[in-house]
Amino acid sequence: MSRKSVMFKNKNGKSNNISGKNIARIRKKMQPKVSQRAFADKLQLYGIDVDKNAIQRIECGKRFVTDIELVAIADVLNVSVETLLKK
């Protein structure tokens, strides 16, 4: 019998991450200004394969964020992971 991978959707009806709003808020405050595309480019330098669309989906809560991505995002934003996880 083969086993299929199953990905469970978040059933709370709200968001697939709790960091997206913080990521967007902090990115928008960066000086000089950093677009979603430029942010994705910076993350790619950390080996995180994301594009502008993935950043947009993360920031609006439509995309899950892995722990590896969260650490890289915190580094690029120059904040702690804990800061990104605050509600």
Image (cartoon, rainbow, N blue to C red):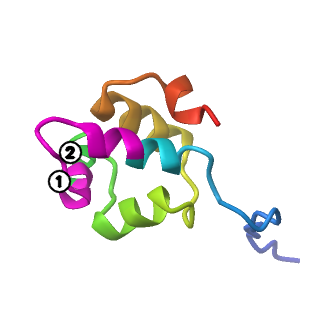
Q: Give yes or no for residue 60 being in the magenta stretch.
A: no
Q: Which residues are magenta?
A: 25-40
Question: Residue at left 54%, top 63%?
Answer: 63
| Element type at mark 1 | helix
Give the mark count. Answer: 2
Residue 83, x across and y down, in percent = 51, 26
Amino acid type, label 2: Lys
Pointer 1: residues within 10 angstroms few (<14), some, or many (20+)? few
Left/right placement of residue 78 relative to residue 12 reads left
Question: Residue at left 56%, top 24%?
Answer: 82
Tell me the chief SS of the magenta region. Answer: helix
Cβ atoms under marks 2 and 1 closer than 8 Å: yes
Pointer 2: residues within 10 angstroms few (<14), some, or many (20+)? some
| Element type at mark 2 | helix
Question: Residue at left 31%, top 33%?
Answer: 77
Residue nearest the viewer, comparing 40 with 6: 40
Quadrant in the picture for residue 69:
top left
Question: Residue at left 81%, top 72%?
Answer: 3
Residue to which mark 2 is pinned: 42
Residue 59, x across and y down, in percent = 46, 57
Residue 55, x across and y down, in percent = 37, 59
Residue to which mark 1 is pinned: 38
Circle on res. 12: none
Amino acid type, label 1: Ala
